[in-house]
Image (cartoon, rainbow, N blue to C red):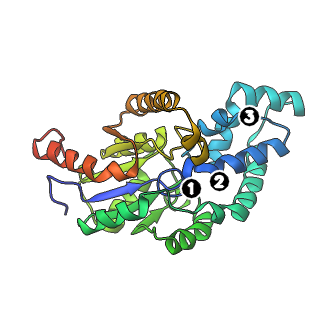
Amino acid sequence: MAEMNRIQMIVFDWAGTTVDYGSSAPSEVFDRVFSQAGIHLTREEINGPMGMEKKAHIRALLSTSSGTEQWKARYGAAWTEEDVQKLYQVFEATLHDVVAEYSVPIPGVVETVRQLREQGLKIGSTTGYTSQMMEQVLPRAAELGYEADCVVTPDVTGASRPTPFMLYECMRRLNVYPPCAVAKVGDTVVDILEGKNAGAWSIGILTGSNLLGLTQAEYEAMAPDELELRKQKATERYMEAGADLVIDSIRDLPAALAEIDCRMAGKEAAC
């Protein structure tokens, strides 16, 4: 059992948090799949449900006013669950072909995870990708210096974020308890909700995040005042979802965890 007054495990999200700056792979594939179906969505619309299991993400996109209206105009009827399944099959096949190319760790991840391990912390990961998809990306990320102690996918638990069950499965596999000894770290609103629904701490990351919605080139080229405004808006969304802390980049995580340990020692959190 974990010590009662400090964090014992970090549960990271995958794309946009530890690898794939800006969560580009799923965004690109959703854009391709829907465009092939004659449905044209903005990047902001595509990124809105990011972090969910991918069939749920497709349903969410079809349920937007734009998705619903375009589908009916093109096909003469409302979308059905059969349409969701067909789109998902195309999504899965397309992602399978490209996802390994998007497995490069985000700057600072390899060094920070090494530092956390040296402090005795366990490293878990939850994702909206399936086990089959992760078979493509895990070896590539490991080659480049990042791997988790366990990775849990929605098909393993039968439930995706924002439910807490993937996080609980990480706790079970790595023998960590209670939930307040866990910090969930992610780049989407559903990551924050996953942590809060589990009774864990939730930390949002800005740099490289899906919520910020910028590629690395866009981030580096953006005017400082505009970038700061975007970060403020993203921070507000994290906090509205219940985030305990929001950090600029993963390099700030050790300091954030130290702050949480102090809070726990002061009994600000109940286990």
Q: Nearer the viewer, residue 134 or 107?
A: 107
Q: Is residue 74 left or right of residue 28?
A: right
Q: Which residue is mark 1?
A: 20
Relative height, residue 40 to residue 51 (above, below): above
Label 2 sits on a secondary structure element that is helix
Q: CA distance from mark 2 to mark 1?
A: 7 Å
Mark 1 surroundings: few (<14), some (14-19) or many (≥20) residues within 10 A: many
Q: Which quadrant holds residue 268? A: top left
Residue shown at 42% from the left, 52% from the top? 165
Q: Earlier in the sequence, mark 2 or mark 1?
A: 1
Does the CB distance between marks 2 and 1 fall below 8 Å?
yes
Residue 101 at what x, y percent from top left? Answer: 65, 64
Res 102 visible: yes
Q: Nearer the viewer, residue 39 or 170?
A: 39
Label 1 sits on a secondary structure element that is loop
Q: Which residue is mark 2?
A: 25
- Type of amino acid at the residue the image marks with label 2: Ala
Q: Earlier in the sequence, mark 2 or mark 3?
A: 2
Mark 2 surroundings: few (<14), some (14-19) or many (≥20) residues within 10 A: many
Relative height, residue 127 to residue 36 (above, below): below
Relative height, residue 217 to residue 146 (above, below): above
Residue 96 at what x, y percent from top left? Answer: 70, 63
Residue shown at 52% from the left, 58% from the top? 19
Mark 3 surroundings: few (<14), some (14-19) or many (≥20) residues within 10 A: some
Q: Earlier in the sequence, mark 3 or mark 1?
A: 1
Q: Which residue is mark 3?
A: 41
Residue shown at 35% from the left, 43% from the top? 202
Q: How many marks?
A: 3
- Type of amino acid at the residue the image marks with label 1: Asp
- Type of amino acid at the residue the image marks with label 3: Leu
